[in-house]
Image (tube, grey):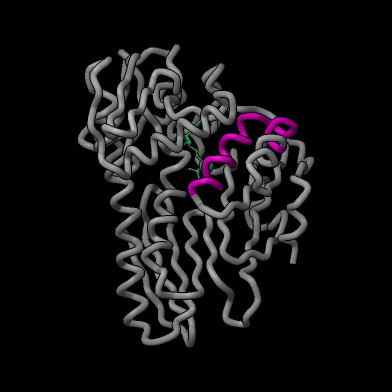
Amino acid sequence: MREEALALDKSFVASAVFMDTLVTIEIVCPGSAAGCAERAQKAFAWFAHVETLCSRFDPKSELSRLSSSPLGVPVSVSPLLFELIEFACAVARASGGAFDPTVGRAMEASGFNRNYLTGEQKTSDDANAECSYRDVALDPESQTVTLSKPLVLDLGAVAKGFAIDLAAEELRPFQDFVINAGGDILARGRYSSGTPWRIGIRHPREPQASIETLAVSDMAVCTSGDYERPRPDGQLGHHLLDPQTGQPVDGVASVTVVAPSAMLADALSTAAFVLRPERGIALLESQDVEGMIVTTDLRVFETKGLSRYRP
Ligand code: ADP
Ligand code: MG
């Protein structure tokens, strides 16, 4: 874990790496920088916790243990993991299966089979390519999950957003702060000048340029981009898969979603990416969130209400 902290005049900034992503917390500091630093450490700890809970690469993670549990047998899971899986399955239903938390095996087959911390490779030969979220049954009363087919659960599309929301709860004593996990952002309150936070949305083909700037307060802004995670083996492809084909989605370069929680923005950006522009925008509007979809030929589609976030 790499860490840097810097106490500026009125704002506190600290960064650390979790989930193969640089996470930065910026707090407009009302009191001592020491108070900010202490809270920021607690906020970072949530990223570590969520990563430990649902790493698809660590065989000891709760998620891996669930994925390899006997079929047809209800498995008790922790409240956080239950919440994540329940939410992921709800997004799967809402998106008609475009979003699917059982893409783990397809991710492995697409070359995303290496633990970023150790370089260790993982292949689950026994997992069934035909599986879907329908093979994951949840019982809220007993907080159990029952798998009906061999599959590999992958919560990569929601875990980061979930961790951002948990970290934001930890920072609740502060009015104004931003958590930025590799471009997935939650902004609370205002910037020191009293204006809403300005969030630059990366141009999918020009890494140093913004394609859009949004002004947000008490909102999360998450982006899924085909440029974000190249295949670890250097082959062509990216990490957003169409569950119907197991192949990377083509035609879409990036999707940005503005939503009240980071978990929702994170999940819906992935879902809309897989659904492609027309159906993707329709999903976002049906879920009452705003967003934009940029195609690989750089056409921009957006929800009707997105302009309200333009500064
Ligand atoms: P990033 O991790 O770059 O922020 P996303 O939030 O869009 O990107 O999530 C991408 C991750 O979601 C992939 O790495 C994989 O773990 C998972 N994933 C890929 N395709 C799907 C899909 N169709 N449905 C659900 N999760 C997916
Ligand atoms: Mg996502």
Using the image as rendered, state which of residue 108 and residue 308 is in the foreground.
308
**In this image, 83 relative to 248: left or right?**
left
Residue 241 pos. (x, y %)? 54, 27
Is residue 173 shown above or below 55? below
Using the image as rendered, state which of residue 264 and residue 266 is in the foreground.
264
Question: What secondary structure predominates along the stretch shown in magenta?
Answer: helix
Picture residue at 49% right of the left edge, 33% below the top: 90
In which quadrant of the rendered view does residue 208 lie? bottom right
**In this image, 219 relative to 251: left or right?**
left
**In this image, 112 relative to 276: left or right?**
left
Residue 120 pos. (x, y %)? 28, 34
- Specify start and end residues of the magenta stretch as a single range: 263-281
**In this image, 80 relative to 181: left or right?**
left
Q: How many marks?
A: 0
Asked whether residue 273 is drawn in magenta, I would say yes
Quadrant where the C terminus sits is: bottom right
Asked whether residue 13 is drawn in magenta, I would say no
